[in-house]
């Protein structure tokens, strides 16, 4: 999920990469291509610098070989930081960002058509019956259909705040 904040505090999700059963090298290649479309940089490769690159906590767990998935991505030029994984506050931030036009509360969270998986996932989310303020966790099927991974990526994006704000204009639409 690639997003940015504008000077008014709106969050714009401009692109996504979603694929299953790929090795980190193939994911990294697709991620670098996505960043290149927007002339963003990871370690000086493109024009503008990416302010943060976050991932869920499971990516930082050590595997049987002693390495983490995050380490494998770092070796491929993508340095990940742990995202804020507080589910309740993350979903609350998303709800707040969607606004309530009927009540006169404008949205502050916007999605580019280049994010079809996210746009498809959000309307299908359901409240967890055991915790109504949380979203029911849904895993994709064996073919990678369904699931809430795109929504989780959005939750990480809105909940993990950058330390500094760097205004710049995105290109490549």
Image: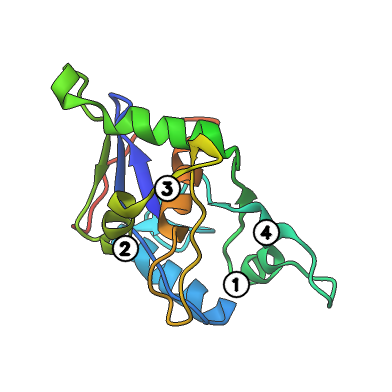
Residue sitting at x 66%, y 61%: 59
Say whether residue 70 is left or right of residue 173: right
Q: Position of residue 80 (x, y in %)?
A: 61, 55
Q: Secondary structure at mark 4?
A: helix
Q: Is residue 141 above or below residue 153?
A: below
Q: Label 1 belongs to which residue?
A: 76
Q: Position of residue 9 (x, y in %)?
A: 33, 26
Dot 2, how many residues are within 10 Å of its Cα: few (below 14), some (14-19), or many (20+)?
Answer: some
Dot 1, how many residues are within 10 Å of its Cα: few (below 14), some (14-19), or many (20+)?
Answer: some
Q: Label 4 belongs to which residue?
A: 58
Q: Label 3 belongs to which residue?
A: 154
Q: Secondary structure at mark 1?
A: loop
Q: Label 2 belongs to which residue?
A: 117
Which of discs 1 and 2 lies nearer the camera? The answer is 2
Say whether residue 41 is left or right of residue 103: right
Q: Position of residue 158 (x, y in %)?
A: 44, 38
Marks 1 and 2, Cα distance to the nearest angstrom? 25 Å
Marker disc for residue 32: none
Q: Earlier in the sequence, mark 3 or mark 2?
A: 2
Say whether residue 158 is left or right of residue 111: right
Q: Position of residue 58 (x, y in %)?
A: 67, 59
Which of discs 1 and 4 lies nearer the camera? The answer is 4
Q: Secondary structure at mark 2?
A: helix
Marks 1 and 3, Cα distance to the nearest angstrom? 23 Å
Residue sitting at x 16%, y 25%: 101
Q: Earlier in the sequence, mark 2 or mark 4?
A: 4
Marks 3 and 4, Cα distance to the nearest angstrom? 16 Å
Marks 3 and 2, Cα distance to the nearest angstrom? 11 Å
């Amino acid at each position: 999920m690639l997003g940015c904040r504008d000077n008014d505090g709106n969050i714009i999700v401009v692109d996504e990469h979603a694929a299953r059963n790929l090795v980190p090298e193939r994911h990294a290649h697709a991620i670098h291509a996505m960043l290149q479309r927007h002339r963003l940089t990871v370690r000086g490769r493109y024009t503008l610098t990416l302010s943060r690159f976050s991932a869920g906590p499971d990516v930082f767990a050590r595997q049987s070989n002693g390495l983490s998935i995050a380490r494998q991505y770092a070796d491929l030029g993508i340095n990940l930081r742990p995202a804020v994984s507080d589910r309740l506050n993350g979903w609350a931030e998303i709800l707040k960002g969607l606004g309530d036009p009927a009540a006169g509360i404008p949205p502050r969270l916007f999605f580019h058509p280049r994010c079809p998986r996210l746009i498809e996932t959000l309307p299908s989310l359901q409240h967890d019956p055991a915790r109504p303020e949380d979203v029911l966790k849904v895993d994709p099927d064996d073919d990678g259909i369904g699931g809430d991974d795109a929504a989780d990526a959005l939750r990480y994006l809105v909940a993990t705040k950058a330390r500094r704000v760097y205004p710049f204009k995105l290109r490549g639409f």
